[in-house]
């Protein structure tokens, strides 16, 4: 049910470690690659627990004809980052031609770029592109430790005093309210970081009274409040029940089982995969940035691509009926 995907063969040509627990992998891609803007992402065919799956990663600047991703190893990974860490030069897979849902507008007179941890990946390309065009920008980059900050040295060399790092273990905390206050009213902010940072950014931006259209954000990974557990999902109206493994998203489990689903971003951003929650035996771990906090609290709907439940039985309604699916 996705459109626009164009799959290409890809071969690993370089593997680097730009920061602690971050693996950068460069692929040579078959056929000509159209130019893509900073913030673009690619889908990659991965193998998790012996089964094929698809994971989505931001592409970072690389040489023409190649795609490069930088992936942090997550202890609670659903398998994608662990697979990336097994890659060696010569390994082959398939990737999609990059698409962009986190685009720079190129219209703003001022840009604030905010990165949390591995959320630097789209921000890195944006900072380089804005700097190359001489656009006014400020980059703030927050992380637990300096050793975990991929691309920080290169960006500091490029941006000088237009960049500031906030490192927890050095006692420096990023104050989003203060950052938004110093951004001129006609400026735009681009934020990529963990779920908590994105919720905080949205709340601080709303409180500042600025137009939400000037705040753009992207969530990385699918870090939830709880570790992943397997659960069973019953699809009302279709009479289907599907087991969801701990290393698998509900969307992947449903589509692999042949349940018709509509989806696009696979990152909890677009809301296309949202399903109605009919009944949940256990708490729902919402991991999207599509629903408001109030909507997440109501638990009436959830994004199948990232959100899950803490085990047991979940009943959802996708809107499809048996006759639609036939
Ligand atoms: S596919 Fe976009 S939110 Fe799930």
Image (cartoon, rainbow, N blue to C red):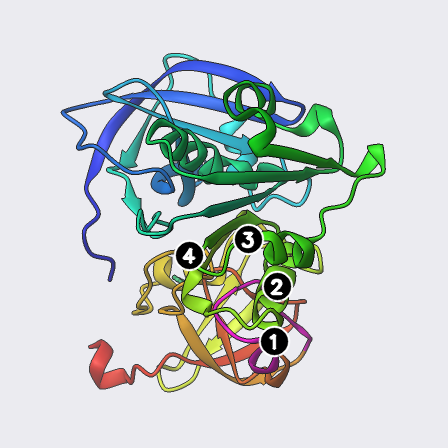
Hey, which quadrant is residue 27 in on the image? top left
**N-term mark: 1 or 3:** 3
User: Magenta segment, principal secondary structure?
Assistant: loop
Give, as a single range, the part of the protein colored magenta: 282-296
Whether tag 1 and tag 2 are in contact, CB under 8 A, the answer is: yes
Check disc 2 and report the residue beneath it: 199
Looking at the rendering, the quadrant in which ligand 1 lies is bottom left
- As measured in the structure, the alpha-carbon distance from the residue carrying label 1 to the one carrying label 2 is 8 Å
Does mark 3 have its CB less than 8 Å from ligand 1?
no
Check disc 1 and report the residue beneath it: 293
Relative placement, left or right, of 315 versus 230 is: left
Does mark 1 have its CB less than 8 Å from ligand 1?
no
- As measured in the structure, the alpha-carbon distance from the residue carrying label 4 to the one carrying label 1 is 25 Å
Relative placement, left or right, of 154 versus 66 is: right
Residue 117: horizontal and vertical position, in percent? 63, 39
Is the residue 98 above or below the residue 4 in the image? above
Residue 322: horizontal and vertical position, in percent? 27, 83
Residue 86 visible (yes or no): no
Check disc 3 and report the residue beneath it: 183
Q: Quadrant of the C terminus?
A: bottom left
Whether tag 4 and tag 1 are in contact, CB under 8 A, the answer is: no
Decide which of 110, 302 is in the foreground and name it: 110
Q: Residues within 10 Å of mark 2 (few under 14, many from 20)?
A: some
Hey, which quadrant is residue 199 in on the image? bottom right
Say which of marks 4 and 3 sits in front.
3
């Amino acid at each position: 049910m996705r459109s626009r995907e164009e799959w290409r063969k890809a071969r690993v040509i370089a593997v680097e470690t730009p920061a602690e627990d971050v693996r950068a992998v460069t692929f040579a891609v078959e056929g000509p690659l159209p130019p893509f803007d900073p913030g673009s992402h690619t889908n990659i065919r991965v193998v998790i627990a012996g089964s094929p799956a698809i994971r989505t990663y931001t592409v970072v600047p690389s040489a023409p004809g190649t795609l490069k991703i930088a992936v942090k190893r997550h202890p609670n990974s659903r398998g994608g980052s662990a697979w990336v860490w097994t890659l060696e030069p010569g390994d082959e897979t398939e990737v999609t031609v990059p698409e962009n849902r986190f685009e720079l507008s190129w219209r703003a007179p001022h840009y604030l770029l905010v990165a949390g941890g591995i959320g630097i990946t789209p921000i890195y390309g944006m900072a380089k592109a804005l700097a190359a065009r001489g656009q006014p920008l400020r980059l703030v980059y927050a992380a637990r430790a300096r050793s975990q900050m991929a691309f920080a040295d290169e960006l500091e060399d490029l941006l000088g005093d237009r960049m500031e790092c906030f490192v927890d273990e050095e006692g420096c905390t990023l104050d989003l309210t203060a950052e938004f206050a110093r951004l001129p009213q006609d400026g735009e902010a681009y934020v990529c970081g963990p779920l908590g940072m994105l919720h905080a950014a949205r709340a601080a931006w709303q409180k500042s009274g600025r137009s939400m259209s000037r705040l753009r954000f992207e969530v990385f990974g699918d870090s939830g409040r709880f570790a992943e557990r397997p659960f069973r999902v019953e699809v009302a109206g279709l009479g289907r029940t599907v087991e969801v493994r701990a290393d698998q998203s509900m969307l992947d489990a449903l589509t692999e089982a042949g349940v018709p689903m509509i989806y696009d971003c696979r990152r909890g951003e677009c809301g296309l995969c949202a399903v109605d929650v009919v009944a949940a035996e256990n708490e729902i771990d919402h991991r999207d940035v599509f629903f408001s906090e109030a909507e997440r609290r109501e638990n009436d709907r959830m994004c199948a691509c990232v959100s899950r439940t803490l085990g047991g039985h979940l009943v959802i309604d996708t809107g499809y009926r048996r006759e639609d699916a036939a």
